[in-house]
Amino acid sequence: MFKLDPAQFAVAGPLLKRLAATQASIDAVASGVLDGDIWVDDPTHPKVALLCEGGDGYYLAGDVDHSPSLR
C-alpha cells in the first residue's frame, strides 16, 4: 500500500465516493479540512483505498471486481 500525499487525495475519490455519501468525514479528510491519511494499492490507478481519519475512523473501499496480484 502507498500513502498518498494530500495533493494526491483526489486519485482515491472515485473509490471513496459511495462511502462519502453517508460519512461526512471522508470528504473532510479528502479536502484537507480534517486530519487523516489515505493509502492505496496503486498511486496512479488505485483499486483499493484505506482512509484513516485522525486515528478514530478507518474506511476501506475498493473495486469489487478487481483481482489483485499478490506477487
Image (cartoon, rainbow, N blue to C red):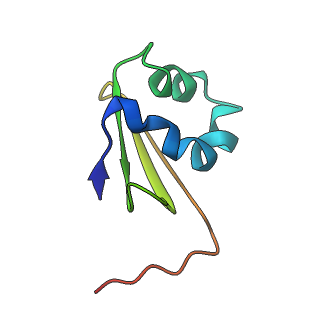
On screen, residue 22 above or below 59 = above
Q: Nearer the viewer, residue 7 or 16?
A: 7
Q: Nearer the viewer, residue 67 or 4?
A: 4
Q: Position of residue 37 (x, y in %)?
A: 33, 34
Residue located 56% across and 25% down the image: 27
Find the residue positioned furthest to the top: 33
Residue located 38% across and 62% down the image: 41
Count of picture labels: 0
Does 15 sit left or right of 54 as displayed?
Answer: right
Q: Position of residue 5 (x, y in %)?
A: 30, 36
The quarter holding residue 63 reads bottom right
Residue located 58% across and 43% down the image: 16
Does 55 sit left or right of 8 as displayed?
Answer: left
Q: Quadrant of the C terminus?
A: bottom left
Residue located 66% across and 40% down the image: 17
Q: Is residue 52 visible?
A: no
Q: Position of residue 25 (x, y in %)?
A: 52, 23
On screen, residue 37 above or below 27 = below
Q: Quadrant of the N terminus?
A: bottom left
Does 52 sit left or right of 63 as displayed?
Answer: left
Q: Is residue 30 visible?
A: yes
Q: Position of residue 39 (x, y in %)?
A: 35, 48
